[in-house]
Image (spheres, helix red, strand yellow):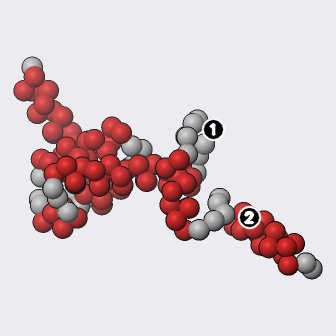
Amino acid sequence: MAPGQRAQEEELLALERGWYVGSEQFRKELPAQMKVGPENYGEEVYQSGEQKALKLVESELKKLGWTGADLLERAKGDITKIRVAKKLRQETTMTLQWIANALHMGTKTHLSHLLYWHGKEKKKRRG
């Protein structure tokens, strides 16, 4: 078998095992470039959504002047963490569990409870 043919076969085998061919850096950049529509599903869409969510968390931490350590030190029910969680819910497809883990807010049910009461308080202040 010719060396070029062998390389082609290895690339084809890689496609059978995954959804991309290329470096690890390429794999990390690719989901952010994806345009997701109703015909898309699965791992690719999840990774694209996760990429967006991670960038949003990073952006919010930067605006606040926080680091990852600040997320650990602050209370699970910190009002600022709740606001970031609400933004993640509105702008991404990440689950409550993912958000709770990313922001160190306890369990998904605790986060759900916090978001519910935070929303209820806002309505009460408006009304």
In the picture provided, is 117 more to the left or to the right than 59?
left
Dot label at residue 16: 2
The reply to whether residue 69 is visible in this rendering is yes
Q: Is residue 93 above or below residue 107?
A: above
Dot label at residue 64: none
Residue flagged by tag 1: what amino acid is it?
A: Glu
For the residue pair 38 and 116, the one nearer the viewer reads as 38
Say which residue label 1 marks: 39
Residue 103 figure quarter:
bottom left
Circle 1 SS class:
loop
Residue flagged by tag 2: what amino acid is it?
A: Glu
The reply to whether residue 76 is visible in this rendering is no
Q: Earlier in the sequence, mark 2 or mark 1?
A: 2
Residue in the image at 42% along x and 44% along y: 93
Residue in the image at 7% along x and 26% along y: 125
In the picture provided, is 8 more to the left or to the right than 30?
right
Q: Is residue 35 above or below residue 6?
A: above
Residue 64 % position (x, y): 16, 51
The Cα atoms of the two marked residues, 2 and 1, are separated by: 20 Å
